[in-house]
């Protein structure tokens, strides 16, 4: 029974794990920005890099799902 759903459980578990890693990175950057004297431009760059990293991972996942559903 569990073997039938192992792919779904793996997909859900991996997504929750990666979401928690992104959350921890976000908390870490917030703490670093708060404790150091970074200018507003530096803070913007730090958050931009984090945001682009998350967006690129999400886009990769979407592209992968589209390609797998089309049979490639």
Image (spheres, grey):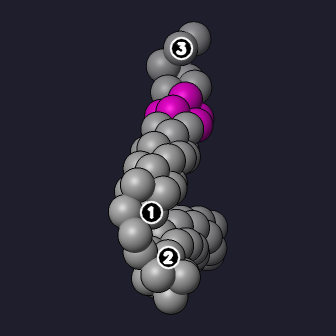
Percent across and percent down for residue 39 are: 47, 81
**Which stretch did the figure color magenta?**
7-13
Instruction: Look at the numbered discs 2 and 1 and tell me whether their residues touch, using CB distance below 8 Å.
Output: yes
Q: Is residue 55 a member of the stretch shown in magenta? A: no
51 or 15: nearer the viewer: 51
Q: Where does residue 12 sit, x and y in percent of width and height? A: 58, 37
Question: Which mark is drawn over residue 2?
Answer: 3
Q: Residue at x 47, y 70 (%)?
A: 50
Residue furthest out toward the top: 1
Q: Is residue 35 shown left or right of residue 61? A: left
Instruction: For residue 67, say whether it is visible.
Output: no
Secondary element at tag 2: helix
The residue singled out by tag 2 in the image is 43
Magenta stretch, main secondary structure class? helix
Q: Work out whether mark 1 precedes mark 3 in sequence or the reverse, and give the earlier one.
A: 3
Tell which circle, 2 or 3, labels the residue nearer the N-terminal end: 3
Mark seen at residue 20: none
Q: CA distance from mark 2 to mark 1?
A: 7 Å
CA gap, disc 2 and disc 3:
46 Å
Residue 61, position as x, y percentages in the image: 53, 66
Residue with the mark numbered 1: 33
* Residue beneath the point at 48% across and 57% down: 34
Task: Name above or below for residue 64 compared with residue 7.
Answer: below
How crowded pointer 3 is (Cα within 10 Å; few <14, some 14-19, many 20+) is rated as: few
Task: Tell me the residue at 49%/76% (across/down).
Answer: 43
Along the polypeptide, which appears first: circle 2 or circle 1?
1
Q: Nearer the viewer, residue 39 or 60?
A: 39
Mark closer to the observer (2, 3): 2
| Camera-side residue of 69 and 51 | 51
């Amino acid at each position: 029974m569990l073997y039938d759903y192992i792919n779904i459980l793996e997909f859900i578990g991996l997504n929750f794990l990666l979401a928690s890693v992104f959350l921890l990175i976000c908390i870490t950057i917030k703490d670093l920005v708060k404790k150091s004297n970074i200018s507003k431009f530096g803070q913007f760059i730090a958050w931009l890099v984090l945001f682009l990293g998350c967006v690129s991972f999400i886009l990769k996942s979407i592209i992968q799902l589209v390609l797998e559903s089309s049979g490639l």
